Amino acid sequence: MGQSNLQVRIAGSSILRYGLAVILFVVALALALLMQHFGFHSVELPLFLFAVAITAWYAGVGPTVVALVLSIAFFDFFFTEPRYTFYVGSSDVPYFVVFIGFTLLTAWFSAVRRRVEQDLRRTRDHLESEVAQRTQQASLLDLTHDSIFVRDMNFYITFWNLGAQELYGWKAEDAIGKDSLQLLQTVYPIPLDDLRAELLRTGRWEGELERTTADGTRIVVASRWSLRRDAQGQAVAILETSNDVTHRKRREEEIQSLNHELAKRSSDLEAINKELEAFAYSVSHDLRAPLRHMAGYTELLQKRVTTALDEKSRRYIAMMLDAAKRMGTLIDDLLAFSRIGRAETQKTR
């Protein structure tokens, strides 16, 4: 509860949010420099990532971007070669990818967590209102755009708000009194008996369900169930709130498909590179043997008949030796090229 209040206070003030981002970055930078001074290396990246994660958790998107930019810039300035410059080499790219990927993941997780907490608070408020004044609660639930309906323990619908009508397509008079299992044709992620057992044990359940609307469309909803008990502690009703997440699920499936395609293309590219390396290695070795023979016999010829040849013939022999030497250099370069995929990148003029 104290942590939630702290988040609310920080989220309500832009100065506190951006100030928190700067302070966390400064602390991470100071600790990283101090660790480096005492001989501890490779700790700066976790420190900066931790600062960005805390900023995303408490301060939101804007301060997180500030913390991320500062962390990337000063990580590059102090801890990557060449130091004390903002030069970005190819070897630095993985660090920046880690920074950005970790920040996106943390920001997404924080946003989901806040949304879940807000949904749970709304559900709790609705339940408390239902216990206190059922009639007033019904009118209030009917005003919200969230899908909310109530079922008895046999899954017959007893309340159906406008949000449920907008989401599923049935009016209240068409839904109330119907068996929700048959009406919505729900597909559950776990056996229904296990779900009911968890609901009776904990008083709540949440997860994603697949349902059918009045026009036959299949949708995915993020559903939250809360159990209502009477004064004797007996379970009497289930209140459910749900939101349509069909588009989000489709985006997630598209992203997963793109990731699989990217992995396949990367694997194909790696195989092609290996074939190219093997080809270059084989060709360079096959060329080296006849070239050695050409150069060796030309040198023997030069030693034996150089005095009997005129200037023009000697120049021909010298040109043959020079060409063989240049060909040897080209073969060496070809061998070096075949190994370039395994060599460490080195910057040079």
Image (cartoon, rainbow, N blue to C red):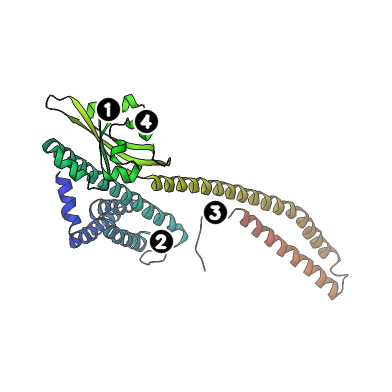
Q: Height in image: 228 above or below 257?
A: above
Question: On the image, numbered disc 2 is attached to which residue?
Answer: 81
Q: How crowded is mark 3: few (under 14 residues within 10 Å), some or many (20 or more)?
A: few
Question: What kind of element bears circle 2?
Answer: loop
Return the residue at label 4: 182
Could you give the CA–CA distance between mark 2 and mark 4, rounded to whole angstroms? 65 Å
- The alpha-carbon separation of the residues under discs 1 and 2 comes to 55 Å
Q: Which mark is residue 207?
A: none
Q: Please state the horizontal and vertical placement of residue 88, each as a whole percent of the image.
A: 42, 63
| Residue 23 x %, y % | 21, 59
User: In the image, what residue occupies the spot 40% across and 42% down?
Assistant: 219
Mark 1 lies on residue: 198
Tell me the residue at 43%/46% (across/down).
250
**Label whose residue precedes the other's in the sequence (4 or 1):** 4
Location of mark 3 (residue): 343
Q: What is the secondary structure assignment of the residue under circle 4?
A: helix
Q: Who comes first in sequence, dot 1 or dot 3?
A: 1
Q: What residue type is labelled 3?
A: Ala
Q: Can residue 154 be seen in this view?
A: yes
